[in-house]
Amino acid sequence: MSVFAPGYYGRFACIMDKCEHSCCYGWRLSLDDRTRDKYKSCTLAYGERLREFLGEDDEGGFIVTGSDMRCPHLDERGLCRVIIELGEEHLCDICREHPRFYNLTGDRIEVGIGASCPEAARIICSSRDYLPIMIEGHPVPELEVIEESVSTLELRSSIYKDMEKTSFDELEESLIKRLGISRAVLSSRMMEEILSGLEYIDEGDRKLMLRAVQEKKKLGDAELKRIFAYFIYRHLTDCTSEADCAARVGFALFSTRVVEKMSELTDSLDDALRMYSAEVEYSTENTDDAIMTIWAENI
Ligand code: SF4
């Protein structure tokens, strides 16, 4: 099966101890079954420490963290002791793959880098080569086939073509008309309504995002297109119906415009995208809620 990725994908590398928003804290650190079993039976010296911080509940294995939610395997320099002591092959699937995401669509697998990682957000916001290209030699993960779904590759590639020819504002207008997306979705009122109904990891982020919807910030055309290209690549894959498809494009437009406004209040555009992605995209519930609200508004 062919594997595709945005042109910039190969430039991603974790910046480790230089990362200001490390993925090694703030989340539930779930372990896949293979890694949990490996940690349980590890006979190497560091095995004791692996077991000291190994928890299990109904959802499976996880790494036990303190109240600061910091991974106990991070050393004082911010480096991973599992890699230092045992090697990268002892990482669990999530740690090895983050921030990569995968989608199976049509007869291909698509991989990308998720913007909740600050280095990924920096690359996404600064790269012109966002169009998907075929890549060789990438490991192919097993992915679940979604039954009765329709590939949106044709629609997406027509959007990519239009992006080359028109401004982002014109593209947005034509998508609203062509797909029947409600214009209200991009209003401050709807942004506030959608964002205020979501769950947040950080109360400070929630306040900033709700304040941002009243901002009038205008980003440059190239920046808007890079952000929008990221959202449609990630969220416009297989859809269940035309209405689902329109809701997903609406979600990509909504997300791009919210990030635009947030960038007025954050240190940088990268940081606005990172924060939005961490709070909205990395919660399936939040993403689904936003898409469903947009779907209902389009009808
Ligand atoms: S968030 Fe990204 S750059 Fe930071 S530690 Fe994780 S993978 Fe590395």
Image: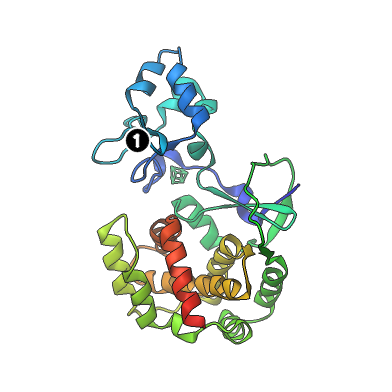
What residue sits 50% from the left and 26% below the top? 90
Q: Position of residue 73 (x, y in %)?
A: 37, 29
Ligand 1 is located in which of the four quadrants?
A: top left
Q: Position of residue 71 (x, y in %)?
A: 35, 35
Q: Is residue 68 left or right of residue 119?
A: left
Which residue lies under the disc numbered 1?
71
Residue 227 shows up from this direction: yes
Q: Is residue 226 above or below residue 10?
A: below
Q: Is residue 171 left or right of residue 184?
A: right
Q: Position of residue 24 (x, y in %)?
A: 38, 40
Secondary element at image label 1: loop
Q: Position of residue 92 (x, y in %)?
A: 49, 33
Q: Residue 282, located in which quarter of the rendered image?
A: bottom left
Label 1, residues with CA under 10 Å away: few <14, some 14-19, many ≥20: many
Question: Ligand 1: does it lie within 8 Å of the C-beta at label 1?
Answer: no
The count of marks equals: 1
What residue sits 53% from the left and 56% below the top? 123
Q: Is residue 139 left or right of residue 194?
A: right
Q: Residue 231, located in which quarter of the rendered image?
A: bottom right
Q: Amino acid at mark 1?
A: Cys
What residue sits 49% from the left and 28% below the top? 35
Q: Is residue 45 above or below residue 284?
A: above
Q: Is residue 141 above or below residue 218?
A: above
Picture colour scheme: rainbow
Q: Is residue 131 left or right of residue 64?
A: right
What residue sits 63% from the left and 71% below the top? 241
Taking the view exactly as shown, the residue that stands out farthest to the left is 67
Q: Is residue 198 above or below residue 140?
A: below
Residue 216 shows up from this direction: no
